[in-house]
Image (tube, rainbow, N blue to C red):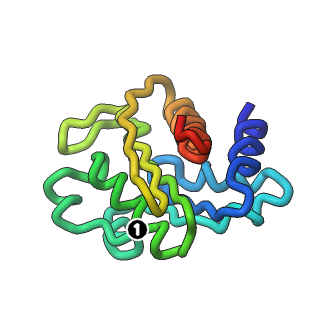
Amino acid sequence: MMMSLCCEVLKALEGKTLVTAESLTGGGIGAALTAVPGSSRVYKGGIISYTNWVKANLLGVPEEILETRGAVSEETARAMATGVRKRLEADIAVAVTGLAGPDGDEFGNPVGMVYIAYADALQSLVLERHFSGTREEIRNQTIQDALRLVLRCAEPQGA
């Protein structure tokens, strides 16, 4: 299932470049994409931004957002996607931030709260998701939804 989803994404993005900014998935989106032979024609790479320092200093997420809204927020996800797209000079970016467990955060976000952001030259879009399951299940659901979002946004109709 994951391999076929990755193949669909890479085929849909032929002629474009894709980058990732990953927090809770720890590089899982990049790993899934690079399992496909020839993926380097589309996938350039990503930044694993597991800490706020990396989010702020490498992705350009404003400190104010991290301090007032937290790492797990719509604003952070959007800034991660636009930041990685700009820094890695790509056509399209997807970013994920959330809580896979074992605990919630100081902003009251529960385990399973995830934000997935998409950014290209014309639009940015953020989805809020509430996943359940084990840590690994939450991470896998996040990876799949991130890839589905890229696929959906890559379609000419934007359907």
Point out the image quarter for the N terminus.
top right
Identify which residue, 7 or 34, lies in the foreground. Answer: 7
| Percent of width and height locating residue 71 | 29, 53
What residue sits right under mark 1 in the picture?
A: 83
Picture quadrant of residue 109:
top left
The residue that appears at 27% across and 52% down in the rendered structure is 75
- Residue 32 seen in render: no
The residue that appears at 73% across and 51% down in the rendered structure is 10
The residue that appears at 41% across and 54% down in the rendered structure is 123
> Eyeballing the image, is 109 above or below 31?
above
| Percent of width and height locating residue 135 | 49, 34
Total label count? 1
| Percent of width and height locating residue 25 | 52, 48
Name the outermost residue toward the top.
132
- Residue 54 seen in render: yes
Identify which residue, 123 or 109, lies in the foreground. Answer: 123
Name the outermost residue toward the right.
37
| Percent of width and height locating residue 101 | 40, 37
> Eyeballing the image, is 9 above or below 46?
above
Identify which residue, 28 or 83, lies in the foreground. Answer: 83
The kind of residue on which mark 1 rests is Gly
Q: Is residue 12 left or right of residue 102?
A: right
> Eyeballing the image, is 113 above or below 72?
above
Q: Secondary structure at mark 1?
A: helix
Identify which residue, 140 or 74, lies in the foreground. Answer: 74
The residue that appears at 85% across and 56% down in the rendered structure is 37
Name the outermost residue toward the front.
157
Point out the image quarter for the C terminus.
top right
Picture quadrant of residue 42:
bottom right
Q: Is residue 140 left or right of residue 74?
A: right
CA neighbours of label 1 inside 10 A, class few (<14), some (14 to 19), many (20+):
many
Q: Is residue 76 left or right of residue 85?
A: left
